[in-house]
Image (cartoon, rainbow, N blue to C red):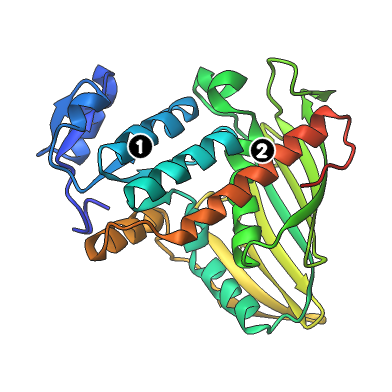
Amino acid sequence: MLATGHCEAVVIAEPSTDMMTAAAKVAPSARFVGTLDELLTEDLDGVVIATPSAQHAEQSIRALHAGRAVFCQKPLGRNTVEVKAVLAAAKAANKLLGVDLSYRHTEGMRRIKQLLKAGDLGNVMAIDLTFHNAYGPDKPWFYDRLQSGGGCVIDLGVHLIDLALWAMDFPKIIAVSSHLMEQGKRVSQDRDHVEDYAVATLKLASGTIVRLACSWRLNAGCDCVIDASFYGTGGGAALRNIDGSFYNFVAHRFKGTTHEQLAQPPDDWGGRAAIAWAQQLKKSSEFDPAAEGLVAVSQAIDLIYQSGSMTGEPTGQ
């Protein structure tokens, strides 16, 4: 985002010396301060929150109360209560709020969204979502439920749940069932452990059935498997990673036994969510009602965790 000229990093709040050194290489003209409070005394248009998940909601709210637009790493909050609190603060301050749900901005997903909006796939009956990561997070706080809010569902699944709900214009979820596991054993919400494998089924008010599978450290035979497939009465479409890559995606449209390519690499999509926020901020810093969809995503995640703690029994809103 810095290199594209859409914004300038003026001040960075970073308590870690090592991270400060790394940040200085990316933004050599920026000044460094030790705390968010110090940063918020500066004359800034917006604030980017890139801290452990437990701090996202509280820090976003402080920035919004200080009159700054906010772009936050995912998840915006560890649960719906936190997400709703951030939304309330953004509305009260009338400030722009964005979250780094970057897979929306792949060219393939943009094309699939266009097909869905035009009704070219007919009635969407099923959405299959997969995110298997052969690696686990490298920071200890990811494995602390209090700090992270959960395991692979809130870390990886959040991206695909967002894709499905966003692509379908956020229909209501009427039932959820899920199974959460750690090292092959059942995990429930009353334990300190977090899940490294999860499967869930969501039934939408539109009648669509969404199936999600996500994991850390799965023996997948490649770095990762990422797939968002949409199947309707008039055809199908899918966004899938290529050769186990975290970054390269291809999108296809399906009709019976035939397929047509919608998008392929190269596609420099990684920073587009932040760039879109910065571009919107240049036009207006006012609250964008589209952020309301963040609540639906957090509600879906809450329901997955609730169902998982109830031995997989369906849960509804």
Q: Nearer the viewer, mark 1 or mark 2?
A: 1
Q: Amino acid at mark 2?
A: Val
Task: Answer with left or right where residue 111 lies relative to residue 55.
Answer: right
Q: Residue 307 in the image: x percent, y percent? A: 81, 36
Residue plotted at (76% across, 47% down): 317
Q: Is residue 118 above or below residue 85?
A: below
Left or right for 209, reference 17: right
Res. 49 mark: 1
Residue at 65 percent of width and 67 percent of height = 168
Instruction: Report the residue at 76% width, 80% height from top.
Output: 235
Of residues 63 and 197, which is closer to you in this image? 63
Residue at (54% x, 50% y) in the render: 294
Q: Residue furthest top?
A: 192
- Of the pair 39 and 136, the residue shown nearer to us: 39
Q: Position of residue 84 (x, y in %)?
A: 53, 42
Q: Judge whether residue 284 can be spotted in this image.
A: yes
Q: Quadrant of residue 152?
A: top right
